[in-house]
Image (cartoon, rainbow, N blue to C red):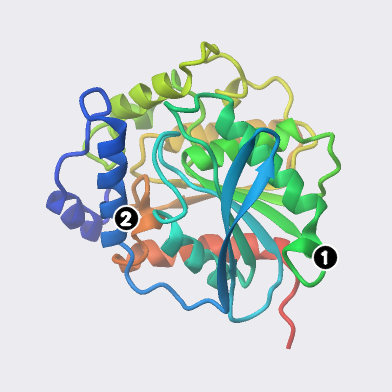
Amino acid sequence: MIHPDLALYRDSLPPASDPRTTPVVERRRRYGELTASRRGSPPDMASVETSEWHFSGRTIRYRRYEPQSGPRGIVLYAHGGSFVLGDLETHDALCRRIADDLGVILIAVEYRLAPEYPFPAGLDDVAEAMREVALHRSRYALKELPVIVMGDSAGATLVTVACRETRDDNLAIAAQALIYPTLGPEVVTDSSHAFGSGYFLEMDHLRADYESYLAGGVEHTDPRVSPLLADDLAGLPPAVVMVAECDPLRDEGVAYAGLLEHFGVEVELLEARGMVHGFVGLAGVIEAARVDLDDFADHVARFTLPESH
């Protein structure tokens, strides 16, 4: 059952913008306004710096957050937004909270979005960012620190696929932390039926966004698009997978955790009771969401260095 505070907040929102009838530029504007309204009062950072990576044939922005305490590790973060929405600003408050909760330097990557840049552009950006951060840690911290890759929703999908794409690159990723990932456009589960409309994430909207993301012609059966169809996940970093009870993507997240475990990957599965898709972005305005975000951080913290006293 949805948490009562989330139900009240849901009822106060205007209808979600339909991607089939609303221009993507307008959707991005509205999404930016919505995330700004949820910002709350995120913790102060010791420093926040926005810079650029110059990868082959493209320039990608990133933002480095350094918390007041630590650092105990480095987190590379990929934002959610159905592969078409989101940027450094929409997830700024969330990144500050995660950096503070974990005591880590957090590096948020602004990967390319569909429809302007369909698959595999965003995936390529996240994979290249992983290589950059993992192989050149001293550029981002004063000492060698464990690197955790993390993302929410579409960002979590890109992160876990990028882990497989870079499996043979000797990146020594300490863990992958996945917050309610989407694991394929054609996945149909009990939770997608139960919560597919009226619970923040509209499944028909997500499928329309997948059409934009896959405009380059790749098939949905490609495991880079649908990680649940991967035939080999052995050797991936340990995973912490968090799903939300009232999320249409809940069951596929649970199934993916089971698939990772099947291939011998260490997995911890968490369920945020009463929560919905996107709840970590509500931590600034809904206390129960912040509590579950803090709990997620507590479980990820074992992959960082011990606190110094």
Q: In the image, what residue occupies the spot 73% across and 88% down?
A: 309
Q: Which mark is residue 61?
A: none
Looking at the image, do the residues carrying marks 2 and 1 touch, with CB atoms under 8 Å apart? Answer: no
Horizontal and vertical percent position of residue 174: 75, 53
Residue kind at label 1, given as amino acid type: Glu
Q: Is residue 118 visible?
A: yes
Horizontally, is 5 left or right of 226 in the view? left
Q: Residues within 10 Å of mark 2 (few under 14, many from 20)?
A: many
Residue nearest the observer in this picture, 126 or 174: 126
Horizontal and vertical percent position of residue 93: 42, 64
Residue kind at label 2, given as amino acid type: Thr
Horizontal and vertical percent position of residue 21: 20, 24
Sequence-wise first label, 2 or 1: 2
- Please identify the quarter of the rendering in which residue 266 is found: top right
Q: Residues within 10 Å of mark 1 (few under 14, many from 20)?
A: some
Spatial separation of the CA atoms under disc 2 and disc 1: 33 Å
Q: In the image, what residue occupies the spot 45% across and 34% down?
A: 83
Horizontal and vertical percent position of residue 42: 41, 72
Q: Which mark is residue 35?
A: 2
- Please identify the quarter of the rendering in which residue 121 is found: top right
Helix, strand or loop status at disc 2: helix
Judge whether 158 appears above or below 175 on screen: above
- Residue linked to disc 1: 144
Helix, strand or loop status at disc 1: loop
Residue nearest the observer in this picture, 138 or 157: 138
Q: In the image, what residue occupies the spot 80% across and 64% down?
A: 138
